[in-house]
Amino acid sequence: MKLRIIQLEDSVMKHSAISRVIKNVVPAEIDWVTDMYSGIKKIDEAYRSGIPYDLAITDMHYPLSPGGEADWEVGDIFVDIIGTKYLNPPIVICSTHNRKNPYAYDCVWYNDNYDWERRISDIVKCMYEEKRKAYEE
């Protein structure tokens, strides 16, 4: 059993760092997209297939569409769409800007002065345990 995660992030370095931390603590399948439209499309496809994502991790600054310019409003737009339309998967904001959104499950400040690795680890461990318990029932 693996945790199914979609990550919206346009930085290869940040994506790799977050993926490494997650895969060190739980078995995970991480789909990576670099723009909002691709992320929503993948979430919609997973939802319709009956195998939804267990978690979405999103930055707040990335392109709206493939090849587009990064935009500071895109992360909030993504969180609002998923939070109101799908109500699933839970969303964790992981951004260099310490941002909050009422539809987000949690927010992690991606900063060298903050132990973001431990925080991401704690969140995915909790999600994995919830999935494991539900699977056993």
Image (tube, rainbow, N blue to C red):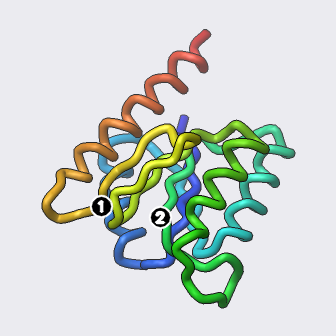
- Tell me the SS state at disc 2: loop
Q: Give the crowd class for mark 1: few <14, some 14-19, many >=20 residues within 10 Å.
A: many
The residue labelled by disc 1 is 110
Residue 68, placed above or below residue 89: below
**Quadrant assignment for the C terminus:** top right
Q: Residue at x 38, y 37 (%)?
A: 123
Question: In the rendered view, does 9 fall on the left or right side of 21?
Answer: right
Q: Nearer the viewer, residue 111 or 26?
A: 111
Q: Where is residue 107 shown, x and y percent of the image? A: 40, 47
Answer with the quarter of the image where residue 47 lies.
top right
Q: Where is residue 6 shown, x and y percent of the image? A: 58, 55
The circle drawn on residue 13 is none
Answer with the quarter of the image where residue 54 lies.
top right
Question: In the rendered view, does 130 fall on the left or right side of 107?
Answer: right
- Tell me the SS state at disc 1: loop
User: Farthest residue toward the top?
Assistant: 137
The residue labelled by disc 2 is 59
Q: Give the crowd class for mark 2: few <14, some 14-19, many >=20 residues within 10 Å.
A: many
Under mark 1, the amino acid is: Tyr
User: Farthest residue toward the right?
Assistant: 48
Answer with the quarter of the image where residue 41 lies.
bottom right
Under mark 2, the amino acid is: Asp
Sequence-first disc among 2 and 1: 2
